[in-house]
Image: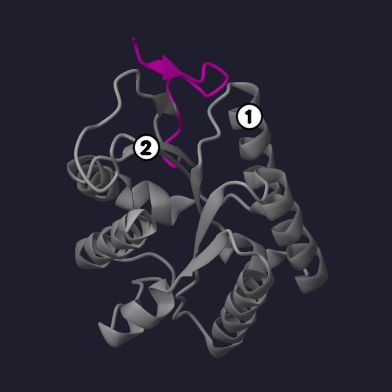
Amino acid sequence: MPDRTDRSWPARPPWDACPRPVWPGTPAVGAPGAGRRVLFIGDSLTRESRVGTARLLRAGGWTPTFRCWGSRRLDWGLAQVTRARELGQLPGVVVVALGTNDISWVDEVTTARRVSALLDRIGPRRQVLWVDLHLTRSAWLDARAARFNALLRAHAARRPNLTVVGWHRVAAAHRIRGFDGIHYGPSGYRLRAQVVSAAIDRLAR
């Protein structure tokens, strides 16, 4: 079966976007993924760690598809879930890595409402992994990130299908700091790929 691409995505994406999302026609083989599909919805942090994450997942038998675009927010994520569903490409495992651009520019009430809406749109029958935020730009932004992470964990406490991937804890332990308080160097993205892929592997175990 041939690969399928989302032709609503630009054929030549701008520099801050991922390539067109690809739904592989041939699933990966191996354990623990056993060919199961994973959809990623994220911003520039997902874009920059995409290649390393995909390599680790395919080695573990997972079949990933990436929808990522820099500076995007939760409302964009809602649209990506809708589009994936239209294409029949909303699998049983969805990884969300959004929120950084919301806490900087969107009020907290709106952000909380959009988190709920996104989880509702994905639905309770799918496993959702949400990568929490690790920012080192300012005390103000760090505090907002902490509140966002607490919001995710509050949802996880009442949504059995939601797992929060504790990127902040691991990044802090390894003293990962963004060169601009948000984005990392190569070692940071390698670690992020390892943390996220390991969290997905744990679903299978």
Q: Which residue is mark 2?
A: 36
| Residues in magenta, as a range | 1-16
Q: Quadrant of residue 198?
A: bottom left
Badge 1 local density, few (<14 within 10 Å), some, or many (20+)? some
How far apart are the two marked residues, 2 and 1, measured between alpha carbons? 17 Å
Residue 179 placed where, x, y %?
34, 71
The kind of residue on which mark 1 rests is: Arg
Residue 129 placed where, x, y %?
49, 58
Give the camera-side residue of 196 and 158.
158
Determine the residue positioned at 50% across, 22% down: 10
Q: Secondary structure at mark 1?
A: helix
Q: Which residue is mark 1?
A: 85
Residue 63 in view, yes or no: yes
Residue 70 placed where, x, y %?
49, 48
Count how many numbered circles sit on residues in the image: 2
Decide whether residue 148 is among the magenta residues.
no
Q: Main secondary structure of the magenta part?
A: loop
Determine the residue positioned at 64% across, 81% down: 147
Decide whether residue 7 is among the magenta residues.
yes
The kind of residue on which mark 2 rests is: Arg
Depicted 27 relative to depicted 71: above or below: above
Dot placed on the residue nearer the N-terminal end, 2 or 1: 2
Give the camera-side residue of 77 and 2.
2
Instruction: Determine whether, in the image, residue 133 is placed left or right of residue 197.
Output: right
Residue found farthest to the bottom: 139
Instruction: Determine whether, in the image, residue 97 is placed left or right of residue 143.
Output: left
